[in-house]
Amino acid sequence: MDAELEVRAPLNPTEDEEKVVRSILSIFKVKVDTKLDEAIVCSGNISSLEKLKRLIRQRRIRSAAKAVMRSGIRGNVVEFYLHKQAAYAGKVSFSNAEGESPLGPIKVTIKTDDPNKLIEWLTE
């Protein structure tokens, strides 16, 4: 299964850049670049999502994860948000685009030929 992963997290002036990077690395197996006011990840490798898959299974939030991800399907793209502070603690907690995560959420965008198949794989 092919999937292109893009992860973006705002870097607020009051935040430690290393902590924001750690938040992303605790959920995804990726290399993080920081530019100006944002931490950015791009990966074309499905293995980048293995940690997320494992954490969803460990926290026993498969049905909730499936529902959130399915509601974020737009064509061949799945988009959802994760709570930045929870991610820093190594936990998956879904968030809204605004309001729930005081320092801004982590925005996850996954482009794939079959979004439903990807979601099933992540939540099996």
Image (cartoon, helix red, strand yellow):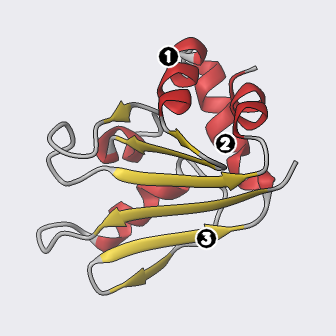
Marks 2 and 3: CB-CB under 8 Å?
A: no
Q: Is the residue marked by circle 3 packed among few (<14), some (14-19), or many (20+) residues within 10 Å?
A: some
Please give the residue where the numbered disc 2 appears in the rendered image: 51
Q: Amino acid at mark 3?
A: Cys
Please give the residue where the numbered disc 1 appears in the rendered image: 64
Which is in the foreground here, disc 2 or disc 3?
Answer: 3
On screen, residue 102 above or below 100: below
Viewer-nearest residue: 105 or 97: 97
Measuring from the top left, give residue 15's x and y in whole percent.
19, 66
Mark 1 falls on what kind of element?
Answer: helix
- The number of discs equals 3
Q: Quadrant of residue 39?
A: bottom left
Q: Amino acid at mark 1?
A: Ala
Q: Residue furthest bottom?
A: 36
Name the quadrant of the C terminus: top right
Marks 1 and 2: CB-CB under 8 Å?
A: no
Which mark is on residue 120?
Answer: none
Which mark is on residue 42?
Answer: 3
On screen, residue 30 above or below 17: above
Measuring from the top left, give residue 25's x and y in whole percent.
54, 57
Residue at horizontal 48 percent and vertical 29 percent from the top: 71
Q: Earlier in the sequence, mark 2 or mark 3?
A: 3
Q: Is the residue marked by circle 2 packed among few (<14), some (14-19), or many (20+) residues within 10 Å?
A: some
Mark 3 falls on what kind of element?
Answer: strand
Q: Earlier in the sequence, mark 1 or mark 2?
A: 2
Q: Earlier in the sequence, mark 3 or mark 1?
A: 3
Q: CA distance from mark 1 to mark 2?
A: 17 Å
Q: Residue furthest front?
A: 75
Residue at horizontal 55 percent and vertical 69 percent from the top: 41
Q: Amino acid at mark 2?
A: Lys
